Amino acid sequence: MGPERPNSENSELTRLCRDCGLALNGPAACPSCGGRRHITHPELGGLSIAHVDCDAFFCSVEKRDNPALKHKPVVVGGGQRGVVAAACYKARLYGIHSAMPMFKAYKACPGLVVIRGDHSKYSREGRRIKNIMRDLTPLVESLSIDEAFLDLTGTERLHGRSPAQSLIALQNRVLEEVGVTVSIGLSYNKFLAKTASDLDKPYGFALLGRADALDFLAAKPVEFIYGIGPSFARKLNKQGIMTINDVRKRSDREMAQQFGDLGLHLARLARAEDNRRVTPQSERKSISAETTFDQDIADVQLLKDRLWQVCVKASDHAKRLDMAGRVVTLKLKTKQFETLTRRRTLMEPAQLADRLFRSLEPLLEAEANGRKFRLIGAGFSSLSAHSYDGGGDLLDPKAAKRGQAERASDEVRAKFGHSAVVTGRELRRYHVKKEKKELE
């Protein structure tokens, strides 16, 4: 037996059991599961746009796979010179957050557990959760590996329950089948659903309705609105716009004239207006990979070796997605943390690591003028659904043969493992690391 079916007038549904989703008439314990946690809201039955966000997803997956980590502060991230990719809630109590340099995270929490992470595992688990979402509605707009918007409008007849009840069932199913928790924001548009999902973490369920959204937002600072960064917030503050209510005091024309399209967008969100639809086909804009070095590197040859490494990773990802890119990008970060981005547009979309590397190699040579770098990255953008770089190149007659060799090595690696085929650059890097270790 599932939760009690609400009648066709969903607007009459105002209270649910937080644990099983049963419709309740009063504050007493749930007669079905005995739960005493309730969700109460006057618009509970009439809201259908949701934002679902996994709680500290990477860390939650790692804690699921290793129960000994359950009560420990855990981050997924790089080495001493890398950055935090994800932090569990216990680690956040020490002030640790995503994108924080690892040396600062170690300093903030001496007992910190650091895990390198397994992106393929996180992607696999993320897909499982998205499939559970799609069992509720085809209108699932993926925002990242661990979050999405859902439009459950009109699903009452399909599932025999309100959107809120379906979302409680979703939370329970993800916890049971995947072993991680998700937090949910439910409202009548995407902006408010996203806002609500951050109000009750972890494993939360929060709602914002038409009657309470404006009052809820009024006193919040302008940077409370998702997408308003520190720089734009300072610009607003200089003009006396400190809170969302301050935005409402100005007309759309004033906001647009003073701050452009972003000002007009902000004016509408300040009134809780958001007409964007939940669109299931969210277009991927780029495919990339990067690595942070253990020590700053100035040597051009070593930088090229590392460039090849990230080109292979980006290419492998593009091949898995069966996508190619017409624009290739080189990313470098200096020892002073200055980020350099250099791009090149190709004649045809590319997917191969060899093509990516050879396109970016001259860009790297132009930048590697003795400066020391701490990070290098490579990637594709302006993506298309198919790869066209298996043919030749009039300026590089050997390109076709190298492409065929790369495709053949991909088949061998897929069958026997990544280490089954090793390039000269990878072998040289192995010997350098071995020699360094022997010297130590």
Image (spheres, grey):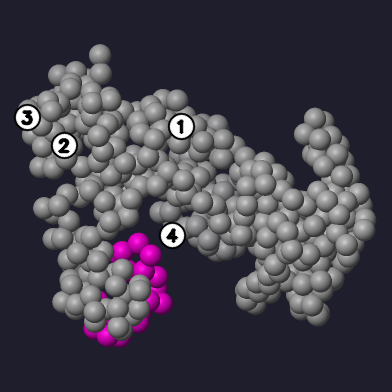
In space, the residues marked 1 and 4 are separated at their CA atoms by 34 Å
Q: Residue at x 26, y 38 (%)?
A: 153
- What is the span of residues highlighted in magenta in the rendered image? 221-242
In this figure, which residue is indicated by the disc labeled 1?
131
Residue at mark 2 = 45
Residue 361: give its label.
none
Q: Which residue is mark 4?
A: 95
Which residue type does callout 2 highlight? Answer: Gly
- Residue at 53% from the left image edge and 62% from the top image edge: 100
| Amino acid marked by disc 4 | Gly
Residue sitting farthest toward the top: 1
N-term mark: 1 or 2? 2
Q: Quadrant of residue 358?
A: bottom right
Q: Nearer the viewer, mark 1 or mark 4?
A: 1
State whether residue 91 appears in this view: yes
The numbered mark, 2 or 4, whose residue comes first in the sequence reads: 2
Q: Helix, strand, or loop for circle 1?
A: helix
Say what secondary structure mark 2 lies in: helix
Outermost residue, front side: 394
Q: Amino acid at mark 3?
A: Gly
x, y percent for residue 302:
84, 64
Between the residue at mark 1 and the residue at mark 2, the CA separation in whole angstroms equals 24 Å
Q: CA distance from mark 2 to mark 3?
A: 16 Å
